[in-house]
Image: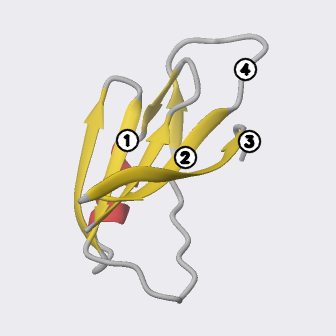
Amino acid sequence: MVIVEVSLLSGFVLAPGSRILLERRTIVKKIEVKASVVYIYLEKLNDESQTFILQLEQVIPMKNLKPATIKVYDYYQPGGLQIPSYSGVRS
């Protein structure tokens, strides 16, 4: 099992519709939201590219947002692979 750990930007929460869309993907086994982190549990990964889109809602206006991080790691060996930080994308 693989975990994608997404730290949310300060002042943001995961939009309810985003969770539903993620859960519909066959590769996604489970989703947990704890405080300001979203954990996406995947059955497994292979050499195919995967794209996950999380819609966030801003609940507290913040200035000078700092980038957040994403970690991908094996559930049984949580040493982790750190992926560079991300910033909010406006739509």
Asked if 31 appears above or below 10 in the picture, the reply is below
Q: Secondary structure at mark 4?
A: loop
- Distance CA(mark 2)–CA(mark 4): 16 Å
Question: What residue is at 41 percent from the left and 57 percent from the top?
Answer: 73
Amino acid, disc 1:
Val
Q: Secondary structure at mark 2?
A: strand
Is disc 4 surrounded by few (<14), some (14 to 19) or many (20+) residues within 10 Å? few
Q: Quadrant of residue 22?
A: bottom left
Q: Quadrant of residue 37?
A: top left
Q: Secondary structure at mark 3?
A: loop
Which of 70 and 33 lies nearest the eye of the viewer? Answer: 70
- Distance CA(mark 2)–CA(mark 3): 19 Å
Amino acid, disc 4:
Leu
Provide the residue designation for mark 4: 65
The reply to whether dot 1 and dot 2 touch (C-beta < 8 Å) is no
Question: What residue is at 47 percent from the left and 43 percent from the top?
Answer: 6
**Disc 2 versus disc 4: nearer the observer:** 2
**Disc 2 versus disc 3: nearer the observer:** 2
Asked if 72 appears above or below 87 in the picture, the reply is below
Is 13 displayed left or right of 49 in the figure? left
Percent x, y for residue 20?
29, 58
Earlier residue among tags 1 and 4: 1
Is disc 2 surrounded by few (<14), some (14 to 19) or many (20+) residues within 10 Å? some
**Disc 1 versus disc 3: nearer the observer:** 1
Earlier residue among tags 2 and 3: 2
Asked if 17 appears above or below 58 in the picture, the reply is below
Provide the residue designation for mark 3: 90
Percent x, y for residue 14?
42, 38
Provide the residue designation for mark 1: 38
Provide the residue designation for mark 2: 70
Earlier residue among tags 2 and 4: 4
Question: What residue is at 28 percent from the left and 80 percent from the top?
Answer: 26
